[in-house]
Image (cartoon, rainbow, N blue to C red):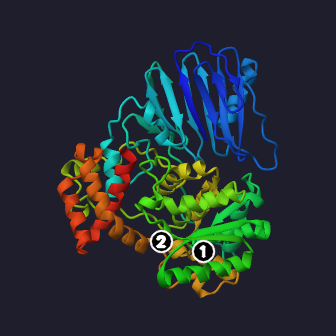
Amino acid sequence: MLSMRIDNTLTRPSWEWAGDRWRSGSSWISPYNHPALEIWSALDSQRVAFQVRERAPERPPHSPGSPRALSTQAYNEAVAEARGWERAHHLIEITPYGITVSTGARCPAPVYLTVHRSTLHGHWDVTRLRNVMPDQRLDPIEIARLLALTGHYSRRTAWQCVNLLTERSSAWFHDGELRVQMPEPARHDEPRELAPDARVIDGYEHLLDAVLADHHYVPEQTAIELSGGMDSSNVAMSMAARHGPILASGALIQEGPAGEQQRRRRQAMIDYSGFRDTTLRAADYLPMDPQHTPHVPLGPHEEIYIAGHSRLLAQWKTEGVLWAAAGVGGDEMLSLPPQPHPPLSPAGIPRWLTPDTFEALRDQESGIPPAPPISDSTLRALACGAPMYLRAGLWPLYPLADPAMWRFGQWLPFSWRGSKHLARLRLQRLGFDQEVTHPPLRENFHDVLKESLARFGPSAIRKMLSTGSPLIDAKFVDADELAAVALRLEQQQSHEQDGMVMHVLRLHHALS
């Protein structure tokens, strides 16, 4: 939602609005420029506060400007109100005692922080901090998580000197030191017994509609990522009920029988809603294909299928789309309670991960914040996806990741949650057939990933080995084992775990 450079050595700086950011000497705070957001600022005799936040619907936004002078009491009241903003926001307060950066429970575009000498730097895209990091030392725990696909939502990032400001947390910076304060654990609920006449599907529809109504967006400039899965389909049908056929939709389409099924299922929903639809073949945007090398650096956490996804967002933007709605969070909202993880075993991780990496995984829960209002995995997905949307100029909407939806899911008996029973019944009630509500074939990117690895994997691995990699230098991965993977891929004798080498290559490119 914002980027910043604040020099802590300035005494009583004078901040002014400079067209696209607040400035004070060499310091600046730049809000992300999008109609979904508004800005607010105020000062008293000793303090100054800045907030970038998601707009409330049906209310005119605050006009950009220099901080408004307030009395001490009025300033305190205004900052307290700003801290309680219920939508996504970041609040920065500068006082004689330091700088505080805080965020709320909703954070579709979180901020990363690093310190270089007396200056605090922050950005929604971690790659934009590379040139101001005091050093490039890797965080062994986070690197191990990324390589073993055991990620957690955490303040940890790939670099020891960079922190992700997690939901409801705050960071305090003074005299070159950054301290992060974690929030209290969020309350979680247990399943409830339904009344005999409970209208569960009606409740789901009404709540999803209310969550959508709580966001500011322009329907004519909004697109829906309609893959055909239960989550995106339910979001799409709720938005269609609110706005009719003025919305756009789109998706990456699979190959083979699953792809044909996906086309039929999506077409049924397009016919129902009247969306103007855009599709791209996933096979035309294979991961690692040199033809689709990103024009900008990508962060260590970004999705592996970003080439096709980014192309879809770019196409929407040329059509005037400024908001993109997705079904992220639906899996977790209707999930059953998690089962305990089995003990960590070397047999469960790929052979190219070194003993040092395996040892780091023993501390993989380090830095995890207390229980958030929604799931760890949903928050991680939001953080991973944000840079892709914001680079494209689109603001993401995630109605199923709203804490109210999450609470509703927790209240439901397990029979309504398992296998997304509620989501399927809702589509069935709308009149969709069995193929839409219970598709017989799985629709995923497995075949796309397999083809990409076969075509580009060996050359990508050998290039990594010849040019060198921070992952090899820091002894996170074993070069000989990677060479063996390249040979197996060339000989079409790959092992089951060899597909995970794609994530090694993705992380290598992000760190190099």
Q: Is residue 102 above or below residue 267?
A: above
Find numbered disc 1 in the image and state the secondary structure of the residue it sits on: helix
Residue lying at 64% horizontally and 52% vertically, measured from the top left: 394
Vertical side of 261 occupied by 410: above or below? above
Q: Could you tell whether 207 is left or right of 314 in the image?
A: right
Which sits in the foreground, 288 or 81? 288
Secondary structure, mark 2, is helix
Q: Any mark on residue 385, and which?
A: none
63 or 280, which is in the foreground?
280
Between 476 and 62, the one lying in front of the other is 476
Measured Cα–Cα span from mark 2 to mark 1: 32 Å
Q: Earlier in the sequence, mark 2 or mark 1?
A: 2
At label 1, the amino acid type is: Leu
The quarter of the image holding the N terminus is top right
Give the residue pinned by disc 1: 422
Q: Position of residue 341 (x, y in %)?
A: 33, 61
Give the percent coordinates (x, y) of residue 222: 71, 59
Left or right, 273 with reference to 194: right
Label 1 Cα crowd, 10 Å radius (few <14 / some 14-19 / many 20+): many
| Quarter of the view holding residue 235 | bottom right
The reply to whether residue 362 is visible in this rendering is: no
* Residue lying furthest top: 11
Residue 446 is at least partly visible in this image? yes
CA neighbours of label 2 inside 10 A, class few (<14), some (14 to 19), many (20+): some
Q: Quadrant of the C terminus?
A: top left
Q: Nearer the viewer, residue 154 or 80?
A: 154
Instruction: Please tell me the numbered disc located at residue 283.
Output: 2
Which residue corresponds to the image point at 73% horizontal and 46% vertical from the top-left? 35
**Could you say which quadrant of the image residue 14 lies in?**
top right
Q: Amino acid at mark 2?
A: Ala
| Whole-percent x, y for residue 363 in the image | 30, 46
Tag 2 and tag 1, C-beta contact below 8 Å: no
